[in-house]
């Protein structure tokens, strides 16, 4: 992170504690997850990393250049990405909010590598998995913001299997998520963003895992307390 030229260090995005805390962020595992409360800065950070890596801020592949509104923060201008020896061949930035736009762009450029059916003629989750199945390939860099938004628990399991296949063929993933299922991918690096900054966390120590497990184990007690 390079802070030279930051005009307002107290304004968004530098007002976010997790963003302010970043000096260096190792992304050296095949899969890195960003987790944390709503508003903790995950989308801001994945978007800035995606833009710094050459993607359209609204999502899509590196070739997609549509813009319906310019909303990205200035953070990407202050990130220096340090790459390993291999340059990613391919990639995609998928954010839940703009999947519709990506699907439209895919239709406009022709569905070719995205499967035979228009992404708009499939359900959100079907289209999302179709894109991953048909369009994601070997040696790519894939940046996903809440991919679980589209997916049933069963399909999240399917996504884990797709992740594994792609990782074995040299792809890398950066994923912002709230899903205790996706975060379980073995040997992933998990960063938890919070009011005190950004820190690596073990799966079993993450708030998402602990709360989900506790809720499923003690559902009656939770509901009694919440609904009384
Ligand atoms: N364009 C913007 N201008 C000013 N503040 C913003 C802007 N976008 C987001 N914020 C603020 O920055 C903080 C982090 O937002 P961000 O979208 O990165 O959170 P998040 O961790 O992705 O949350 P969620 O889990 O709800 O998706 C929030 O407090 C939000 O209100
Ligand atoms: Mg978000």
Image (cartoon, rainbow, N blue to C red):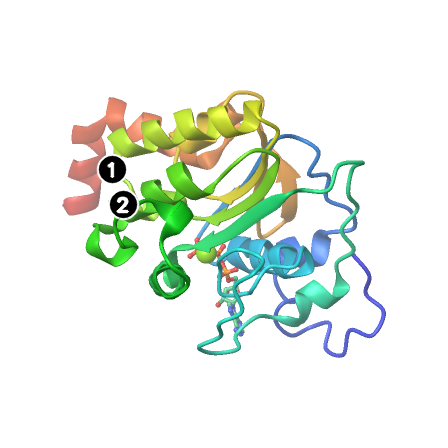
Can you tell which mark lies on residue 48? Answer: none
Residue 210 image offset from top left, x and y in percent: 41, 29
Residue 14 image offset from top left, x and y in percent: 67, 66
Residue 76: image quadrant is bottom right
- In the image, 194 versus 173, the foreground residue is 173
Helix, strand or loop under label 2: helix
Q: Earlier in the sequence, mark 1 or mark 2?
A: 2
Residue 129: image quadrant is top left
As drawn, is 197 to the left or to the right of 224? right
Pointer 1 with pointer 2, Cβ within 8 A: yes
- In the image, 91 versus 125, the foreground residue is 91
Which residue is label 1 attached to? Answer: 152
Helix, strand or loop under label 1: loop
- In the image, 36 versus 75, the foreground residue is 75
The residue sitting at 61% across, 62% down in the picture is: 16
Residue 155 image offset from top left, x and y in percent: 28, 33
Q: Residues within 10 Å of mark 2 (few under 14, many from 20)?
A: some
Can you tell which mark lies on residue 125? Answer: 2
- Residue 209: tell me if it is visible: no
The residue sitting at 34% across, 65% down in the picture is: 104
Q: Quadrant of the C terminus?
A: top left
Residue 6 drawn above or below residue 200:
below
Residue 20: image quadrant is bottom right
As drawn, is 199 to the left or to the right of 128? right
Q: Quadrant of the N terminus?
A: bottom right
Residue 162 image offset from top left, x and y in percent: 42, 29
């Amino acid at each position: 992170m390079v802070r030279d030229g930051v005009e307002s260090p107290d304004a968004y995005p530098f007002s976010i504690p997790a963003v302010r805390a970043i000096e260096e962020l190792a992304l050296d595992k095949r899969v890195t997850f960003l987790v944390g409360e709503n508003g903790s800065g995950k989308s801001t950070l994945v978007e800035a990393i995606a833009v710094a890596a050459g993607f359209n801020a609204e999502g899509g592949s590196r070739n997609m250049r549509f813009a319906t509104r310019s909303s990205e923060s200035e953070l990407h201008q202050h990130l220096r990405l340090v790459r390993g020896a291999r340059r990613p061949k391919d990639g995609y930035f998928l954010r839940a909010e703009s999947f519709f736009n990506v699907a439209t762009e895919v239709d406009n450029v022709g569905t070719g590598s995205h499967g035979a059916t228009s992404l708009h003629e499939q359900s959100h989750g079907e289209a999302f998995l179709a894109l991953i199945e048909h369009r994601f390939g070997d040696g790519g860099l894939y940046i996903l913001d809440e991919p679980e938004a589209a997916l049933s628990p069963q399909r999240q399991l399917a996504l884990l299997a797709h992740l594994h296949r792609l990782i074995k063929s040299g792809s890398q993933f950066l994923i912002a998520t709230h899903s205790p299922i996706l975060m379980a991918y073995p040997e992933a690096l998990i960063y938890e963003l919070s009011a005190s900054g950004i820190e690596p966390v073990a799966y079993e120590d993450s708030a998402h895992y602990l709360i989900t497990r506790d809720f499923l184990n003690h559902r009656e007690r939770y509901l009694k307390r919440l609904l009384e």
